[in-house]
Amino acid sequence: MKAALFKSKDQPLFVEDIKKPKPVKDQVLIKLKYAALNHRDLWLMQEQTQQYPNGMILGSDGSGIVEDVGEDADPLLVGAEVVINPSLEWGNNPIVHGDSFKILGLPDNGTFAEYIVISKKYIFEKPEHLSFAESAAVPLSALTAYRALFSKARLRAKEKVLISGVGGGAGLWVLQFAVAYQGRVYVTSGSDEKIAKAKQMGALGGYNYNDPDWAAKAQKETGGFDIIIDSAGGPQFSKFIELAMPGGRIVNFGRTAGNISDVSTRLLYWKQLSIHGTTMGTRDEFLSMLDFLESRNIKPVLDQTFPLSKVNEAFERMKQGNHFGKILLEISK
């Protein structure tokens, strides 16, 4: 089978022929139709110091058709159209994952290949209203967004929500979820074009974070925010402390802008703010997220699709940061 292999840091992925895996025990073999890129893959390619001479398969998101099953897996699953939950071995505590938690796509082989074997407990029926391409755009980013907005921030209808750096997968899912739940949504971006697109999707306003006065403008126009969902971290995080309403909730799940610094401790306690870190989510949250999508007929925003053979071009587009929505790989027809 064809697979895009990660071998060492700062090298391109190598698309090569490798042996097709076989399912064992409770596993299923999935013929993948589409996979989606995440910033996690990019971080691994840039920061993973361990070398893999034989190659590892990255990729956390995928959709496809069950082709075979191993022992203890229901043979009736063969032919099922499925989407994969990449949040593996979460554990028994819904508040935080356990020591065995891992994300699909290293250390376990992921979805940038024609086939994948995975435990049957991580496959779910593909939402009927979504295509295979749309379904592949869901798992990691939509699960992260759902947990951040509902489990951590506990969004209530009519609350004001600020989403930082809208344009990537998770940020757009937060936007769609919040709008669907009657939140009053605002966004930030370094691109006026992306802000305009977010408004077309239901955002009430937006601010270009390259404008040094953006936070003051946001404060003046909105009076502050009940919920701030951030995927960047970095020095601008301190502005969120100022923009948060008393009793506000700030949730972070990323570090594209680096580490957080210069948080005003006085504002933090005087406003009685809550700052939450989050990543991925539980099986129950994945099911609830799929149900939310289907009940409200929500579809992902797709940016561009590349064939598996052009996986490095797909990552180059992600590096440039001009994409709006999920970048996909077409694995098979």
Image (spheres, rainbow, N blue to C red):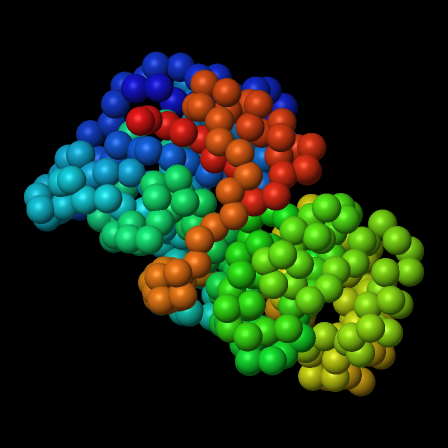
The location of residue 34, given as percent across then percent down, is 38, 35
Residue sitting at x 56%, y 45%: 325
Along the line of sight, which residue is nearer the eye, 166 or 119? 166
Residue sitting at x 44%, y 53%: 299
Residue sitting at x 61%, y 43%: 324
Residue sitting at x 88%, y 53%: 211
Q: Tell me the quadrant of the picture where the N terminus can be found.
A: top left
The location of residue 96, given as percent across then percent down, is 48, 65
Is residue 100 among the parts visible in the rendering? no
Along the line of sight, which residue is nearer the eye, 147 or 215? 215
Is residue 18 among the parts visible in the rendering? yes
Compared to 113, does 223 lie above or below? Answer: below
The location of residue 149, given as percent across then percent down, is 55, 68
Compared to 32, does 224 lie above or below? Answer: below
Query: Seen in the image, is 206 located left or right of residue 314?
Result: right
Compared to 183, does 66 lie above or below? Answer: above
The location of residue 259, given as percent across then percent down, is 75, 52
Along the line of sight, which residue is nearer the eye, 59 or 226? 226
